[in-house]
Amino acid sequence: MINIIKPIIPELTLAAGICLMVLVNSFIRTPHRSTSQILAVLTLVIATATAVPLFNHDVEILFNGQFIIDPLAIGLKISAYVAVLLVVLSTTINEKINQSEILLIELFATLGISIICSAANLLTIYLGLETLALSLYGLVAANKNSIESTEAAMKFFILGVIASAIFLYGISLIYGIYGTLNINLLNVMIVNNTLELKIAVGFILCGIAFKFGAIPFHSWVPDTYQGASTPVALFISTAPKIAAFALLYRLLIDAFISISETWVVMIYALGMISLIIGNLIAISQNNFKRLLGYSAIGHIGFIFLGIATGTKDGLESSLFYLLIYVLMTMVAFMVIEVLSSKHREVKLLKDFKDLNSSHPWLSLIMLFSMCSMIGIPPFAGFYAKWSVLSSLVEANMVYTAIIAILMTVVAAFYYLRVIWFIYFEKTNQEIGQPESTILQKAVVSFTGIAILLIGLYPKPILDFCRQIISSNLLLD
Amino acid sequence: MAFIEIIFYVFSSILVLTSLGVILFKNPVYSAISLILSFITSAALWLLLQAEFLAIVLILVYVGAVMVLFLFVVMMLNISDVIRTSRFNKIAPFALFIGLIIVGELITLIWIRSDQFSMTSSPISVLDTSVGNTTLLGTALFTDYLYSFEIAGFILLLAIVVSISLTLRRREGLKRQIVSEQVNIDPTKRMKLVDLKSEKN
């Protein structure tokens, strides 16, 4: 019995934490935000602590082929838990929106991410995806009094439902052809690349691309980033991307590796379009959150190009890029979060004018994040870009690498513009004293310095990614 | 003609009539009620096929929840004066076209089916009758699909949490029931007896 329970202890912890939080929230008359924050942090810490020893657990498939435990599942789960933990710690306590519910729904989303990470069956994948998607809709709509947020939630909801339906249609086609939803069985059964299989994989890929926010499935990204309140945008831009990677890996590598020539082309096209258009549109943005949305699309393009090499190196570098991207974007959103007060939300680029004279430390951390996003050494973003580019060159995709470098130069323009506003523009408008706590400032400083430290010594994270990817026996 | 076939034809004709009633009644409440009757007769048809779980679920979910909701909406909105127009409006040809396509598809389906699989007897004998399909379904849900089943439960919990958090608006001056005060009330202080002088005639 304990052997069956042991691999799912992280999920059980999350589930128990969710139930406890629902009970505690309903018994406290005036919801005391710090109670639910402590509960959420405690749940996530225990979940991480129980997940870490499972990293070297034998690969095992449980629950009648619905649950798989392997280094990829555990590694991505740990990364997601740590990301959510940092997000929860840096969330502002604010009366305007129901913070306790936000934290609770974020735990639900984390449960969904966990389910996707260790799904061995298309049914489980779909259920995990719906858990994640439903909680994200709820999070975006949580700021009920803002028209922008409601609009973003509505767009996100409708597009998400359509993407989910397309994804489900792909799954139903797969079931119609092979009569099974089990990923391992599918991997064995798929030998011929038939037309109906190609159509099914195409549909499934639409769902994956939507989750990543790759062009042409991107239109929810900028709206959601702009419309959602900052803690929610911070959450959406980080942990769900890890889930999207797990989704892609479980489906494309674990199930459809034998027809990789079909989906590699699609991933390549998606990556190329996202890289070029995402970065070009980002230039003309004045809203900083929207700019981060378009920059996210550009980064997703980079991740997709790494996967499109079809090599083990490419996958490793994509995963590395993803983790670094999550860290960088987290820092950028955290700085906005810390700067914003109850009365005033920092969101436009011109709000950053002369930030350096009032908040020199936060300006420096923002500088770290922006430089890392451009890919300037010695920040972590440099190694991420470098590893993807080198795997592209190794796979004889030199022209793609050149286009990627050109787009990095384009991207440098709008990131540098943020830095210009912070350091060189003068203004008479004071940004005001933020109401952030010491804990928040500590978390921001910690993640900001982490960018620099990983840039100086990227080996542990690189090894982590290598260990995750190389454990898969399907890749040669 | 076997007894079971007589039952089948009785229920089928009720089904056809009530389905016609859904589109032909002028009053939307009548339409909704005849839709309920058509659901119940289809449930009876399913019972004839020994699919008792589907029959129960159809009645519980569609009749018990969906149609009641429908009736509420129909009754709350005062649409009686809007609907009083002609039954066949501009959409009718299009609807007829779609309906014909569906009928055509069904006929082809039955044609192919009777070509490829010779239906020797009624489908009742095909099923294993020793265990009911509710039992089979329950066993599958709680053994093979336990993990997915639990996740589905959490999705429902999530839906409850999200919908409550989106619709609940806390405002000042709300009159709430305070249970502790209600329980701890002292009955002797509840009523005050006042002597009133009776009027003299």
Image (cartoon, coloured by chain):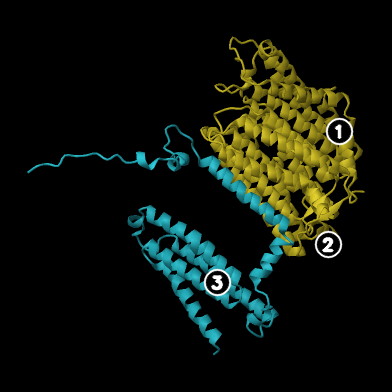
Chain colours: A yellow, B cyan
Q: Do labels 1 and 3 share a chain?
A: no
Side (left or right) of A315 relative to A113: right
Instruction: Assign a secondary structure to mark 2.
Output: helix
Instruction: Assign a secondary structure to mark 1.
Output: helix
Residue reaching furthest to the bottom: B1
Mark 3 vs mark 2, CA separation in Å:
36 Å
What is the quadrant of residue A84 in the picture?
A: top right
For label 2, the residue is A189
**Amino acid bearing label 3:** Val
Instruction: Write down the chain letter for disc 2.
Output: A
- Please provide percent x and percent y for residue A210: 69, 44
Instruction: Assign a secondary structure to mark 3.
Output: helix
Mark 1 and mark 3 residues within 8 Å of each other at the beta carbon:
no
Quarter of the image with the N terminus of chain A in it: bottom right
Mark 1 vs mark 2, CA separation in Å:
35 Å
Q: Which of A127 and A295 is in front in this view?
A: A127
Q: Which residue is pictured at 80% across the width and 47% down the height?
A: A249
- Please provide percent x and percent y for residue B104: 57, 72
Judge whether A170 appears above or below A395 on screen: below
**Residue A265: assigned label:** none
How packed mark 3 is, by other alpha carbons closer than 10 Å (few <14, some 14-19, many 20 or more), is: few
For label 3, the residue is B103
Q: Can residue A259 be seen in this view?
A: no
Disc 3 versus disc 2: nearer the observer = 2
**Amino acid bearing label 1:** Ile
Q: Nearer the viewer, residue A162 or A464?
A: A464
Mark 1 and mark 2 residues within 8 Å of each other at the beta carbon:
no
What is the quadrant of residue A51 in the picture?
A: top right
For label 1, the residue is A461
- Please provide percent x and percent y for residue A75: 82, 41
Instruction: Write down the chain letter for disc 3.
Output: B
